[in-house]
Image: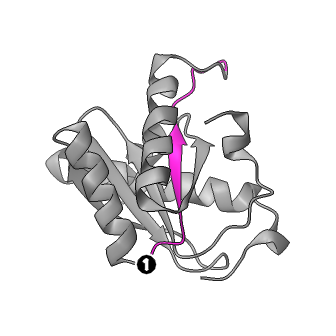
Amino acid sequence: MTEAETDRRDVVSFPLLGMDVSASRIGLAIVDHPDTPPQPWFTYHRTTRARDLEQCTAWITRYHIGGVVMGLPLNMDGTPGSRAQWMRRFARDVQEAGGVQVFLQDERLSTVEAEEMLAAQGVTGPAASERVDAVAAALILQRFLQEHARGQFGGG
């Protein structure tokens, strides 16, 4: 994938699946319509790359996902590092395997913001650890929706 991977001119179909991918987990969120807020969904504990791709494809099929928005882990100065390169490859593989458009969205500080939101709701400790990636995925989806031109959303 190239910089065009985040080109917002592509038509977006719903529902959209948001993913916050870390070394050990994938947080998931979903949004059915551009006028509704994304909802944290659940957290998947990663195993192997092959199994993770298989699981992503299964979600796309099972839930009739129209597109995927994955967090792109950029350095704080906005430059891509090795993790961003890994994510671009993973996003390309999910797009090819799942047959849907995958968009990459800057995810800087999404986990920090998710932790703060959970703490403000009184969710701490293991309960917060289990939900933080799904909440971060919802924040990533929300940022994508806010940056995307409203008139470009397609059906779904």
Check if residue 76 falls in the magenta segment. yes
Which part of the image, by quadrant, shows the C terminus?
bottom right
Q: Position of residue 77 (x, y in %)?
A: 66, 18
Residue 71 magenta-highlighted? yes
Helix, strand, or loop for circle 1? loop
Identify the image quadrant of residue 86. top left
Image quadrant occupied by the N terminus: top right
Residue annotated with mark 1: 64
- Up/down of 2 relative to 57, above or below: above
Position in image of residue 26 (x %, y %): 31, 48
> Horizontal and vertical percent for residue 48?
19, 38
Q: Position of residue 117 (x, y in %)?
A: 43, 53
Q: Quadrant of residue 11?
A: bottom right
Establish if 27 lies above or below 46: below
- Image check: 36 left or right of 85? right
Front-most of residues 57 and 73: 57
Q: Magenta region: which residues?
A: 64-77
